[in-house]
């Protein structure tokens, strides 16, 4: 490794304990389940024969909210990727680990990885909840049956779940990502 602190993969392997890995996995699952449960409630309310068009919210307002959601959620994707990569930049890791023993540095890097995974998911979750609120409004206002295109606001939830699954924290993925970050990749 080209990292300035004499840190080997074995230091990272020892710092990434089963408990630490389990905590990271639980955080990831909890963040993903929040949005899954919310959209489940939206679908359940949609399935109930209660929605009638009340006229409280017009179609133009819901369309405008959908457009704002598209911009907001797309921005959230870029923010999530930027922040997640920024936390694990080589120069920042070297600065944070300077003067620490390899064991302390490895523990710090494992903790920064957890922060990196959280800052990747949270902006995506914000966009997904925004889309979910629009879906909920369309359902409760009776507009979803008239215009099922409002379900497209759920794309941000699909992005969250897909990102959560594709980057799910396994021991080997974490170690590989950290090695790459320490080499500047």
Image (cartoon, helix red, strand yellow):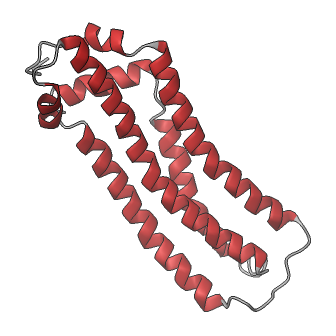
| Image position of 169 (left or right of 108) | right
State the residue at coordinates (63%, 64%).
Answer: 132
The residue depicted at 57 percent of the width and 55 percent of the height is 157
Observer-nearest residue: 13 or 74? 13
Residue in front for this viewpoint, 142 or 19: 19
- Quadrant assignment, res 134: bottom right
Quarter occupied by the N terminus: top left
Image quadrant where residue 33 sits: top right
Residue at 75% x, 73% y: name it: 139
> Could you say where residue 138 lies in the image, as x and y percent from the top left?
70, 76
Which residue is at a point 58% across and 44% down the rendered structure image? 32
Residue 23: x and y in percent read: 51, 26
Is residue 101 placed above or below 128 in the rendered structure? above
Q: Quadrant of the C terminus?
A: top left
Q: Position of residue 179 (x, y in %)?
A: 24, 22
In this view, the residue farthest toward the right is 49
> Would you place residue 159 above or below residue 135 in this image?
above
* Whole-percent x, y for residue 163 in the image: 47, 44
Q: Residue furthest front?
A: 99
Q: Is residue 25 left or right of residue 114?
A: right
83 above or below 94?
Answer: below
Q: Could you tell me how many numbered marks the image carries?
A: 0
């Amino acid at each position: 490794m080209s990292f300035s602190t004499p840190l080997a993969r074995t230091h990272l392997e020892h710092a990434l304990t089963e408990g630490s890995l389990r905590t990271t996995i639980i955080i990831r699952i909890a963040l993903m389940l929040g949005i899954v449960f919310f959209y489940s409630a939206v679908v359940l309310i949609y399935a109930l024969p209660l929605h009638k068009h009340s006229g409280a919210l017009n179609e133009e307002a819901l369309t405008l909210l959908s457009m704002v959601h598209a911009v907001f959620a797309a921005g959230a994707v870029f923010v999530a990727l930027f922040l997640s990569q920024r936390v694990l930049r080589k120069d920042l890791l070297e600065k944070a680990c300077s003067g620490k023993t390899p064991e302390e540095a490895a523990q710090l890097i494992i903790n920064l990885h957890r922060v990196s995974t959280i800052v990747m998911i949270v902006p995506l979750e914000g966009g997904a909840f925004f889309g979910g609120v629009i879906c909920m409004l369309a359902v409760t206002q009776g507009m979803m049956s008239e215009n099922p295109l409002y379900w497209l606001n759920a794309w941000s939830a699909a992005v969250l779940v897909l990102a959560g699954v594709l980057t799910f924290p396994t021991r080997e993925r974490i170690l590989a990502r950290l090695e790459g970050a320490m080499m500047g990749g």
